[in-house]
Image (spheres, rainbow, N blue to C red):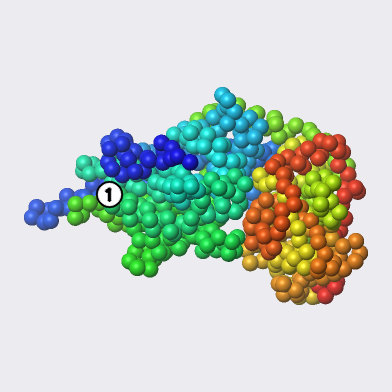
Amino acid sequence: MPLNRRTFLGRSAAAGAGAAMAGGAVAGQAAAVEPVGRRRPAKRYSFTVMGTTDLHGNVFNWDYFTDKEFDDKAHNDVGLAKISTLVDRVREKRGRHNTLLIDAGDTIQGTQLSYYYAKVDPITARRGPVHPMAQAMNAIGYDAAALGNHEFNYGIPVLRKFEEQCDFPLLGANALDAKTLRPAFAPYVIKRLRTPYGRDVRVAVLGLTNPGIAIWDKAHVGGKMVFPGLEEQAAHWVPRLRSMGADVVIVSAHSGSSGTSSYGDQLPYVENAAGLVAERVAGIDAILVGHAHAEIPEHFVTHVGTGKRVVLSEPLKWGQRLTLFDFELVWEGGRWSVEGVGASVLNSNEVAEDRKITSLLGDEHAKVVAYVNQVIGTSVVAMSTAQAPWKDEPIIDLINEVQTETVRAGLAGGEYAGLPVLSQASCFSRTAGVPEGEVTIRDAAGLYPFENTLEARLLTGAQLKDYLEYSARYFVQTAAGAVVDTSKLTNAGGTPDYNYDAVSGVSYDIDIAKPVGARIVDLSFEGVAVDPAAWFVLAVNNYRAGGGGNFPHVPGAKQVWADSDEIRNTIINWVKAKGSVDPAGFASVGWRLTRDGVPVF
């Protein structure tokens, strides 16, 4: 893949001519006048870098799955319209040209708004629309954004079109062309900030994305792009940026700070490597952290060699927070040096939406609201995910029924048609549900908010048991007779809900009084204990099949069928075809929690 024009943005900027300019004269922070005879006061300058991450298609403070204003237990707000108001306030206070605004990735996937303009009215169509996220970020005035892993969910053509529509570069120093091993996107950009002293401050922003893309979106990037580790690429680029004259180096990293990986040893790179980059790569002043959906207002990591402290900050997802990196620079030795830097976050629920943004995208919002409220069928009863993390609920059975039927149809007449088909599904949201009566697109889509596709993999009975044991680590070990508090029963070891799989087609107990690895009891198929050597087909999403969550056996298992359509669309089409959804036709209690053989519920 040849490098596009933006790929050279950082290189040409670093040379001086053509460097991106923040533009305009500013009122920097000047030093006080000292008495005559004393040493001339040092020249000082302060500026602020604002940062967002994991916006996931949120422009409005709106939940398209509930069809009402977004709200959660903490009363957070979401969306770029709120961020825009915060950004304007910071610029007014600091001075427009004393600020930069960057993002750390996962921009174009996550809401029905972003889905609509990728799939329903795609930006890639001839004379297609401009992506709402591009419109909003252009209007707010972003200076750069790192690539997130979810940028690749809709395929490279959609990402390239989005890139074309943005007035700022998408950065990915470790997103390389598979053949040339050269950057497929701009690795960095250098911005110039004018000071009152005639000495510009050159701020380099290096973008790094997540190596897990190679696993999670293999269907889109396999053979086209490769994604080496963040630490490796930062060690290559940061010294170059310094040699090019960068006074300040900021890394925008779509990578958490914990040093952990959800894909185990399938790649030789760390998924959440931002902290390791700060600790091991010299020359970095600050890191905007993304990917982990955590809130880290300010965290310092000390470099192992230089002893320099590097500040990290991660604003909460979806536009709930805005990070501020406040830099203090001093002119000494013929160059600007960072004298101090700190970080903090602003809460978007403290401001109103910017009418500039809501007016700009009002028509797009209205189209999506109308789309998601289309009626596609009816349901005999209401179903909810509220208790699905600890009970076998009909609404999760619905997902597994759709996946099982789809895989069986795909295998019909083939070599594996005679094998039992099992299915895995997770509770992605504890607030999703299907109402009694009319069922809309948003109801069905709310069950599956991710753009996962469906695959079928071969597993033995022994491998299936290992898979279930791994999934059961989700529950906190609870002694027989102890009080069971459902608010403390799940998410053991930080395991998210989407990494607990309920498997249909077999029956089993999960004994939560036992330690991890010894919890699956009475695993049976059609009333008979599962033979460890027996073969099964598992209907599984591509995230799990690709190693997401680090579940055993599945990534290396033989693929016997695959679909290119999202599971979400498969569910929607299934409801349309049935016309009426009745749990009596598919719901059963296939698994339950026990303690020493006694059911917990």
> In the rendered image of this protein, does residue 537 appear above or below residue 483?
above
Q: Nearer the viewer, residue 574 or 134?
A: 574
**Residue farthest toward the left in the current orientation of the protein:** 37
- Residue that appears at 56% across and 52% down: 214
Where is mark 1, residue-wise?
245
- Residue that appears at 70% across and 30% down: 370
> In the rendered image of this protein, does residue 477 appear above or below residue 106?
below
Q: Quadrant of the C terminus?
A: bottom right
Residue 36 screen position, x and y as percent: 9, 52
Rate crowding at label 1 as few (under 14), some (14 to 19) or many (20 or more) other CA atoms within 10 Å.
some
Q: Nearer the viewer, residue 23 or 487?
A: 23
Q: In the displayed structure, does residue 340 sit left or right of residue 601?
A: left
Count of number-bearing discs: 1
Q: In the displayed structure, does residue 325 sit left or right of residue 460?
A: left
Q: Nearer the viewer, residue 418 or 96?
A: 418
**Residue farthest toward the top in the current orientation of the protein:** 127
Residue 211 screen position, x and y as percent: 53, 54
Q: Nearer the viewer, residue 175 or 105?
A: 175
What amino acid is labelled 1 in the image? Gly
Q: In the displayed structure, does residue 94 sit left or right of residue 156?
A: left
Instruction: Give the secondary structure at mark 1.
Output: loop
- Residue that appears at 87% across and 50% down: 586
Residue 340 screen position, x and y as percent: 32, 57
In this rendering, does residue 209 appear at all? yes
Residue 229 screen position, x and y as percent: 48, 57
> In the rendered image of this protein, does residue 227 appear above or below residue 474?
above
In this rendering, does residue 90 appear at all? no
